[in-house]
Image: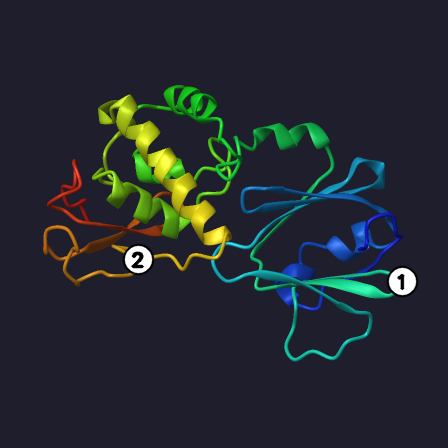
Amino acid sequence: MLVGQRLEVETPHPRAAGKRLAEKLDGLTLQAVEANGKNLLLRFDGGVVLRSHLRMNGRWRVEPRGARRVGLPWLVLRGDTHEAVQWNGPVLELLTDGGRLRRLGPDILDTPPDIDAVVERMGAQPQSRQIGDALLDQRLVAGIGNLWKAEALWDVRVSPWLPLADVRELELRAALDAAHRLMRASVEGTRPLRRCYRRAGRPCPRCSTAIRSFPQGDDARTAYWCPNCQRGGAEPAA
């Protein structure tokens, strides 16, 4: 709806304002909008690309221009008659070199996803890296979030703490296929059935062992897993 228009841009939320996006985007023409996993790529003239990732709580809404709202959105892109408004979106990254977009891995929601390419990228990683951390790396595979990481690994009985060196290729392919299947079903309207995500302390639906949780990776995203029926589920050191 806004593609092809010269936009007015504002960043009401102070954390977004600190990125100085309004100063850099205001007055530019939106040329295209592309989805890549959970990444939304907004291409402006001059080769400027805005990457938005909503994580769990963010959302975009398109509203009539000047619509009343409560609270502070992160970003408002205002066109002739409508405006796109982003709420609760902690990841807003301005890319001035379109070539950098090649860092994003294959989209897990593609039909079919390019699992061969993801396996190849995973194989080029340090093999001491844990699979749960690797699955969240958008450079390796785009679109898998914390919920789907937990549920896909539970589905294939692999612990998020298992090093890539110890993950069998069949297990990796099965985990990627499970993530695709579960996420595609959610996109098509099926309410996700949570087996372990945010179920710490509750019994595993498969073996009744208490689900564990612990921060993982540089971003300290909480991993959820069953230490009994997910292979390699040894408790991490505190």
Secondary structure, mark 2, is loop
Residue 131 placement, left or right of 136: left
Query: Which residue sits at x=32%, y=57%?
Result: 193
- The Cα atoms of the two marked residues, 2 and 1, are separated by 42 Å
The kind of residue on which mark 2 rests is Arg
Per the rendering, the mark at residue 96 is: none
Secondary structure, mark 1, is loop
Query: Which residue sits at x=69%, y=27%?
Result: 99
Query: Which residue sits at x=87%, y=47%?
Result: 4
Residue 133 picture location, percent across and down: 35, 39
Which label sits in the foreground, 2 or 1?
A: 2
The answer to whether residue 59 shows anywhere in this view is: yes
Query: Which residue sits at x=73%, y=54%?
Result: 21
Depth check: give the residue in front, 99 or 36: 36
Depth check: give the residue in front, 131 or 23: 131
Label 1: how many residues lie within 10 Å, few (<14), some (14-19) or many (20+)?
Answer: few
The answer to whether residue 128 shows anywhere in this view is: no
Residue 78 picture location, percent across and down: 82, 62
Per the rendering, the mark at residue 194 is: 2
Q: Is residue 17 above or below residue 101?
A: below
Per the rendering, the mark at residue 80 is: 1
Residue 184 placement, left or right of 40: left
The kind of residue on which mark 1 rests is Asp
Residue 192 placement, left or right of 168: right
